[in-house]
Amino acid sequence: MKVETPRGPATVEVDEAERPRMLLVLTHGSAGGVDAPDLLAVRDAALGVGASVARVTQPFRLAGARAPGSPVRQDEAWGVVLGELRARWPGLPLVQGGRSNGARVACRTARAVGAVAVVALAFPLHPPAKPERSRAGELREAGVDVLVVNGDRDPFGVPEAADATRLVVLPGEGHDLKKDPARVGEVVAEWIVRYA
């Protein structure tokens, strides 16, 4: 599915549950795609608990950029995509999330798009080796429940437990969360069922 936004087209890959209890919308990080191991594991686990899952490739990635550019523009495009998805699946509770930069977008836009919760995978608390440039405010200001799943070896840092509704730190995992992606999926599926 293609969605036209003011920032260019976005694409959406949808996996529908047989009897959907919620809609989970996920997106990628700055340089990655929607086929990242953790996103695929979350999709599979979420389908198992009755969530229809939409994975969004944002306009900046389709344009070939490795950096998302202005948060305002990125969030504007995200809002258009989510508007389309909400119209296609009206009445389903919406949980949105993503990995790294995608987690930041999900936190920043949660209230505006009507999400009931956010799943933040590998939330990039700060640029590597620059802890003074904390992005914890994006977690605290989401306005909805936020699950953060980070690895204890993430060079982008690990948020404080107080900055999220639930923080799960996986031992031995880095920023890519690819050592045991199935565990990431389990953690997310276990948490999102409460919003169905």
Image (tube, grey):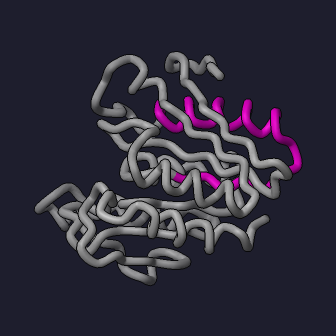
Quadrant into which the N terminus falls: top right
* Residue positioned 47% across, 60% down in the render: 120
Asked if residue 115 can be seen in this view, the reply is yes
Image quarter of residue 85: top right
Q: Place residue 158 in its image quadrant.
A: bottom left
Q: Residue furthest bottom?
A: 162
Q: Is residue 80 magenta?
A: yes
Q: Nearer the viewer, residue 76 or 190?
A: 190
Residue 56 as seen in the image, left or right of residue 17: left
Q: Is residue 174 left or right of residue 74?
A: left
Is 152 left, or right, of 76 in this rendering? left
Q: Nearer the viewer, residue 136 or 19?
A: 19
Residue 47, quarter of the rendered image: bottom right
Q: Position of residue 22 (x, y in %)?
A: 77, 55
**Which span is picked out in magenta?**
73-97
Instruction: In the rendered view, tell whether residue 145 sits above or below residue 35.
Output: below
Q: Percent position (x, y) of residue 53?
A: 65, 46
- 189 within the magenta span: no
Q: Position of residue 112 (x, y in %)?
A: 67, 48
Q: Residue at x 66, y 51 (%)?
A: 24
169 versus 123 height, above or below = below
- The tally of labels here is 0
What residue is drawn where x is 11% and y is 62%? 129
Residue 79's place in the image compared with 100, above or below, is: above
Predominant SS along the magenta part: helix
Residue 93 located left or right of residue 99 = right
